[in-house]
Image (cartoon, helix red, strand yellow):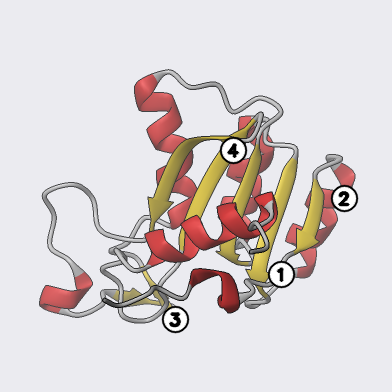
Amino acid sequence: MERISWHQYFMAQSHLLALRSTCQRLMVGATIVRDKRIIAGGYNGSVSGGVHCIDDGCYVIDGHCVRTIHAEMNAILQCAKFGASTEGAEIYVTHFPCLNCCKAIIQSGIKTVYYATDYKNHPYAVDLFKESGVHVEKVALERDFIQLKQN
């Protein structure tokens, strides 16, 4: 049996986290990794204790749901909350980060972004990643590795 690669392992974790998303428009998951260890995970959803899109519908302004916090932001905030440094870390995301998440990733000191799916890849986000020295790489999820066996 072939062993799952690190990229596939962490990307599968991000896809698993996306299943917890409470926004119906797009389910996104993010996993922050340092030294091949998961230090945080996040998915897009409402603030703790708040109303969720799945319960009350999306709150859309200018084409964006403002009710949710993005997966990348939730993962970065989890690191801040529990004192885990993101300096030099990697982040695995199910979709290409939006412009605001791009800026948060850069500011947090994350040095590598792995994403599975292109999604409205903003040209300025691409430029910012490049200018700040953040390596960005597309790593598609190989679904063969995550098939669950049923008894």
Q: Earlier in the sequence, mark 3 or mark 1?
A: 3
**How much space separates mark 2 and mark 4, taking CA atoms?**
20 Å
Please, is residue 5 above or below residue 145 in the view?
above
Q: Amino acid at mark 2?
A: Lys
**How much space separates mark 3 and mark 1, taking CA atoms?**
15 Å
**How much space separates mark 3 and mark 4, taking CA atoms?**
31 Å
Residue at (59% x, 38% y) in the render: 33
Q: Quadrant of the C terminus?
A: bottom left
Name the residue carrying label 2.
130
Please, is residue 105 above or below residue 50 in the view?
above
Q: Quadrant of the N terminus?
A: bottom right
Label 3 close to label 4 by CB (< 8 Å): no
Q: Earlier in the sequence, mark 4 or mark 1?
A: 4
Name the residue carrying label 3.
63
With 7 as the anchor, is 71 left or right in this view? left
Q: Earlier in the sequence, mark 3 or mark 4?
A: 4
State which mark lies toward you, 3 or 4: 4
Question: Could you tell me which secondary element the residue under label 2 belongs to?
Answer: helix
Residue 82 lies, in percent from the top left, at 36, 22
Residue at (37% x, 81% y) in the render: 25
Name the residue carrying label 4.
33
Q: Quadrant of residue 65?
A: bottom left
Q: Nearer the viewer, residue 90 or 119?
A: 90
Q: Quadrant of residue 19?
A: bottom left
Residue at (83% x, 40% y) in the render: 132
Q: Amino acid at mark 3?
A: Gly
